Amino acid sequence: MFCVEKVYLSDDVALAKFSCNITLCKGACCVQGDAGAPVHESEIPVLNKAWRALKDELRPRAREVVEQHGLIAGTGDDLELACTDGAECVFVKYRGDGAAICAIHEAWFQGRISWPKPISCHLYPLRIIEAGGYDYINFEYIPDMCSTACDTAKKTGTYLAEYLKGPLVRKYGSEWYQQFLEECKKIREQTGKI
């Protein structure tokens, strides 16, 4: 484990190679699991706005779930996006090749909304636990979802730390990210995994 300011990270975050290949994984992280994506209370207003802007493009079942149960499940620090029938995020859309994509992220790329998606989704497969004023970050490797991303990254030499530059800068800022990269390089040198 290593620390950058008040953020503790597992060594796997520095050492893992990872690069999403949605053509192969079909967007599994948006449709598998036993809970919705974690969201922060501060994200709820923008998620509600995104829902109003995008709901007519989404699946009827997603609209039905949100109408009956709301967009956000949970309370306090345990908030998550609603899912249809226990797995699919309500913001999921499907491409022609069957891959699940995030409607929020798609609309952001198209310039229709100004926010890319919840930070927990943007940072995936990193997971953050907040405790005592510190963040603890782990690489959540789930073989049936992430093996294609790891295989792709091994071929291209892409480290998880570099692949997630945008989301990490979004969360912690550019200065933090530069310090983080320096620490990652030290760990790779120490372990001989450069």
Image: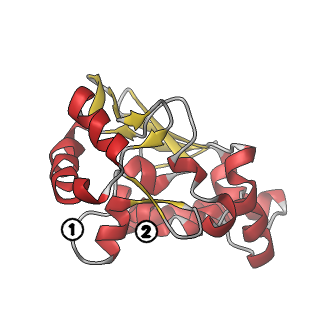
Structural distance between the alpha carbons of marks 1 and 2: 17 Å
Q: Quadrant of the N terminus?
A: top right
Identify which residue is drawn at 74% across, 60% down.
148
Q: Position of residue 85 (x, y in %)?
A: 46, 31
- The image quadrant of residue 98 is bottom right
Query: Residue tagged by mark 1?
Result: 113
**Which three-letter amino acid code belongs to the residue tagged 1?**
Ile
Q: Position of residue 110 (x, y in %)?
A: 30, 78
Question: Tag 1: Cα neighbours inside 10 Å, few (<14), some, or many (≥20)?
Answer: some
Asked if residue 190 lies left or right of residue 163, the reply is right
Whichever of callouts 1 and 2 sits on the residue coming sooner in the sequence is: 1
> Furthest residue to the top?
75
Q: Position of residue 182 (x, y in %)?
A: 58, 66
The label shown at residue 72 is none
Asked if residue 1 lies left or right of residue 169, the reply is right
Identify which residue is drawn at 67% across, 49% down.
145
Q: Quadrant of the C terminus?
A: bottom right
**Which three-letter amino acid code belongs to the residue tagged 2?**
Gly
Colour scheme: secondary structure
Identify which residue is drawn at 59% across, 69% down.
97
Decide if residue 71 is in sight here.
no
Nearer-the-camera pick, 127 or 191: 127
Identify which residue is drawn at 29% across, 60% down.
57
Nearer-the-camera pick, 21 or 69: 69
Query: Residue tagged by mark 2?
Result: 166
Q: Please state which of the two labelled residues, at mark 1 or mark 2, is closer to the viewer.
A: 1
Examine the rendered structure and indicate whether residue 158 appears above or below residue 18: below
Examine the rendered structure and indicate whether residue 20 appears above or below residue 56: below
Nearer-the-camera pick, 36 or 16: 36
